[in-house]
Amino acid sequence: MSDTPSDASPRPRQPFARGLPLAAPLRLNRPSDTWFKPALSVVAASAVPHLTLLALGRLDLVMYTMAGSLCALYGHGLPYARRARTVAGVVLSMAAGLAAALVTASLTHSTAVLIAVGALLAAAQKAACDAVRIGPPGPVILTFVSSAALFAPQRLVQVPAHLALTLGAGAVAWLVCVGPALIRREGPERRAVARALEAAADRVAEPGPRTRDTAAAAVHAAWQCLLASGRPTPVRRALERLVVHAEAAGVFAHPDQDPDRLRAWAALTRAWGPVPEPPPAPGTAAELYGIDAERAALRASGGRRAARRTLLRSLGPGSHLLPVAARTLIGCALAGYLCAALGVGRPYWAIVTAASLYQANTTLTWNRTLQRTLGNLLGVLVFAAVLPLSRTGPLALVLCCLFFSFAAEALITRNYWLGSVAVTPMALLVLEFGGAHPAGELVGDRVLDTVLGALAGFLAAVLVTNRRVAGRVERALEAVAQARTDTESAYADRAHTGPDGLDRARRALTARLVELREAADIAAGEWWQRALPEQRLLAAERAGHRTLAATAQRQGPPVRAPETRRGAVAPAPANGAA
């Protein structure tokens, strides 16, 4: 790259350890705009099997149905076509992890073996969820279920029936997650586009690298949501044109965009009424051509094969995800063995605590360690307070579990520790379905598991280095440079490549810039590595956004005269009524 400094200059070493924040990780944030969706979904998905088992007098089986019900927490940011596939995959993954745990528990009672299997499952679930970018709640729910099942009494002959309960509850969760498509088919797409419009408005109102990067990420997410949403509809066509306006303001920095108008469009898009019909964006035609070609390419067999190759590469020998998986394996095993050595009979909570800590880098892992520890310790106090109420009857126990399921999802978007205050009593109350346990024993074991799990988990994060994140930054810089070249070539030869080729090239460049910023942010919080090439990063981002702005002109194909053959019909405009 001609506008970047040479790599020949020596690079300073990055400090081994950075200062660790204490107050910032515990501050409360604004709640997510969709916090109620997973909260209501998990309650609805859990209520059906819970109340059914209550009527049958078999609440001792709740652990197996809850494994399927918790799958309702996934996929709420995805369009319904992809959500259906994603939640089905989560249900099958949940059943596979549970099957491995139940078979192991039925074949051996060795605590050492059970801890080893639990750590292996946690590492595999972490690597798989990170590779497919499943999103929150990530692998923690899968690890919670499989680790708890390892230490539950089990006979091999019972495993098929228990798995059937999980799959049945998972089917209910799938229906709960996909069912809203019957009411508002384009709901996820509308929310993604509204976020892009809001981020673009912030970019126009307050220009700067932070708002620029946020807007680029939101626009990229909106395009990806629309690409995955299925066949075009009038509403989706209107949403595509709204994203063009968000792109012009947030990514291309077009001066004619009005932030108040963008915010008004965002409010109307998020609401239940019709999608606003925007005028053509500055420098664009009214129709969109590139997204159709890109959608067709993704659906082709070659596009699917490319996606599979990308997924396999993300788990290959040089992947930056493997050190995080190794941290998970070592940290979970260390936490489990420490608790077992101190006399905890079922140290699965220590495994879950350690597994829940691992984020993209060491600094974020430290933040999660603080949040998890504080939330669990406060949650134990909440459990002690509500335990007498839950023991007044089976229905009271079921209602308490449903309440804490809702509260956990309602609070966790404010801060992870606040959600953990509700998760902890819910997890402890699940043990009550199999029979009452001494309250002091439950509280004491959970406190010990939490502290040891957090210490062992963070120790593994510090000791297992992840220097591959620097290599990921280098690859991201190369990808941005190549995407810039491709975009400039497509723009220079746009008469030959056409508007679809230019659109795809620009969207690819936007995606590479988003990935570069993500890689840089992850590397900035990692320890034990060389310093980041800050000047190259800054130059690459500036050059990439300049290229996007310079190639913002969209040209539609030549307008042809309507066909005059008998029976021929002129094509309808793409901006039909939504």
Image: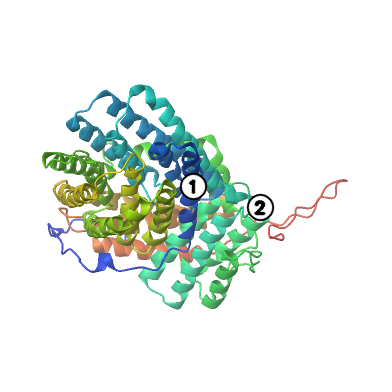
Badge 2 density bin: few <14, some 14–19, many ≥20, Cα 10 Å: some
Q: CA distance from mark 1 to mark 2?
A: 35 Å
Q: Nearer the viewer, mark 1 or mark 2?
A: 1
Q: Is residue 309 visible?
A: no
Position in image of residue 174 (x %, y %): 52, 42
| 377 horizontally vs 138: left or right | left
Residue at 58% over, 47% down = 179
Circle 1: residue type: Ala
Q: Can you identify the residue that label 2 sits on?
A: 233
Tell me the quarter of the image containing the C terminus: bottom right
Secondary structure category for the residue under label 2: loop
Q: Whole-percent x and y of residue 471?
A: 25, 49
Marking on residue 557: none
Check the picture and name the quadrant holding the N terminus. Answer: bottom left
Q: Position of residue 442 (x, y in %)?
A: 24, 48
Q: Is residue 556 left or right of residue 138?
A: right
Please tell me which residue is depicted at 32% across the width and 28% down the height of the picture. 154
Question: x and y percent of residue 137 in the render?
Answer: 38, 50
Marker disc for residue 47: 1
Tell me if I can see residue 254 in this picture. yes
| Amino acid type assigned to the residue bearing label 2 in the image | Thr
The residue tagged with tag 1: helix, strand or loop?
helix
Farthest residue in the front direction? 392
